[in-house]
Image: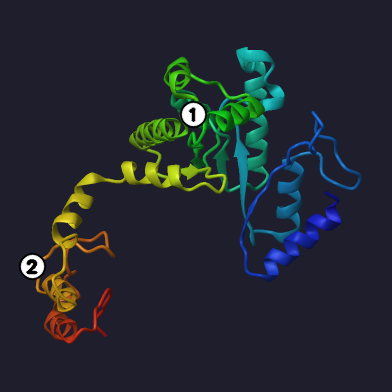
């Protein structure tokens, strides 16, 4: 894309109050194997990051792509990228960050250890910005093979062994994808990384399943015990809210905190009366 069109796009999103940009070089056009710089355009994402920072200062938050297994262009054959190619790719990523990128979101991967090594390698060369893992749930076998082939992603042998017997059963593949994605996310979170990015490809069922199984269980159980109880009447809704304001319930679906906070307890009598009249309070603060 020529610079003029890029600037038009940036000005348009700025006019509409958008502050965050994902700066990518882009894939080759359909039917072509290699990326070719268009006349008047940029050759790489680094050029784009530099351009955005030089023209717009700190207005935009800039996210760039990171490649735990190196960029697909650097991967030759099934053996993965050479150590030199991987190191060069890391060095290029650091240049993007040094040029002004605020955040890294990674290419998909299915070997969590490769991602964790990538994060450590980034830290070793001075990349300090947040690194968000890109998790792509397996929704169907053909799509999985097509995407991993296009991105030259390593498929661990245990995943191949699990998928082969069920590859023609779409529901079984999706269920396995949710299980695998959940285990990957749990391992990543346990390593200290608290932010995840799930590639849905406009299919949200698997992503929602992973989120459901990844969420903390303790709070979910408590919420179910206190709130997921069948109501016998409409008045029961007010009663549930009133019980929370009276301290009889200590969890709430709209807050991570336990019970009313100290600064709110000075008005808990008023809150009780309000909820008893059917005006349900989900947040409150003394004046």
Provide the residue designation for mark 2. 248
Position of residue 141 in the picture relative to residue 229 (left or right): right
List x then y, in percent, for residue 106.
56, 37
Reply above or below: 34 against 53. above
Q: Quadrant of residue 17?
A: bottom right
> Could you tell me how far apart the alpha carbons at marks 2 and 1 are, in whole angstroms?
45 Å
Pick the front one: 87 or 44: 44
Position of residue 29 in the picture relative to residue 19 (left or right): right
The kind of secondary structure element at disc 2 is: loop
- Label drawn at residue 115: 1
Quadrant location of the C terminus?
bottom left
- Label drawn at residue 125: none
Q: Residues within 10 Å of mark 2 (few under 14, many from 20)?
A: few
Pick the front one: 98 or 33: 33
Position of residue 10 in the picture relative to residue 22 (left or right): right
Q: Residues within 10 Å of mark 1 (few under 14, many from 20)?
A: many
Position of residue 55 in the picture relative to residue 200 (left or right): right
The kind of secondary structure element at disc 1 is: helix
Q: How is the image coloured?
A: rainbow
Q: Residue at x 11, y 83 (%)?
A: 269
Please say if the residues under marks 2 and 1 sit with CB atoms less than 8 Å apart: no
Pick the front one: 79 or 83: 79
List x then y, in percent, for residue 148.
59, 27
List x then y, in percent, for residue 249.
12, 65
């Amino acid at each position: 894309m020529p610079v003029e069109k890029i600037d038009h796009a940036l000005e348009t999103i700025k006019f509409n109050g958008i502050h965050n940009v994902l700066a990518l070089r882009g894939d080759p056009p359909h039917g072509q194997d290699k990326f070719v710089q268009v006349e008047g355009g940029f050759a790489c994402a680094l050029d784009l990051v530099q351009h955005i920072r030089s023209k717009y200062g700190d207005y935009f938050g800039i996210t760039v792509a990171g490649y735990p297994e190196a960029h697909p262009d650097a991967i030759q054959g099934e053996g993965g990228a050479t150590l030199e190619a991987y190191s060069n790719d890391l060095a290029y990523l650091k240049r993007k960050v040094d040029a002004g990128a605020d955040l890294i979101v990674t290419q998909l991967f299915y070997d969590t250890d490769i991602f964790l090594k990538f994060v450590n390698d980034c830290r070793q060369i001075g990349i300090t910005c947040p690194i968000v893992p890109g998790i792509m749930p397996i929704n169907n076998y053909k799509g999985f093979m097509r995407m991993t082939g296009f991105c030259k992603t390593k498929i661990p042998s245990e995943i191949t062994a699990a998928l082969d017997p069920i590859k023609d059963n779409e529901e079984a593949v999706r269920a396995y994808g949710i299980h695998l994605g959940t285990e990957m996310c749990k391992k990543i979170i346990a390593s200290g990384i608290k932010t995840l990015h799930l590639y849905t490809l406009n299919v949200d069922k698997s992503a929602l399943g992973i989120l459901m199984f990844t969420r903390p269980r303790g709070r979910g159980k408590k919420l179910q015990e206190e709130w997921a109880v069948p109501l016998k009447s409409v008045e029961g809704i007010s009663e549930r809210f009133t019980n929370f304001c009276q301290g009889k319930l200590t969890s709430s679906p709209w807050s991570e905190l336990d019970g009313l906070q100290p600064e709110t307890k000075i008005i808990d009598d008023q809150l009780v009366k309000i909820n008893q009249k059917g005006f349900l309070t989900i947040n409150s603060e003394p004046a």
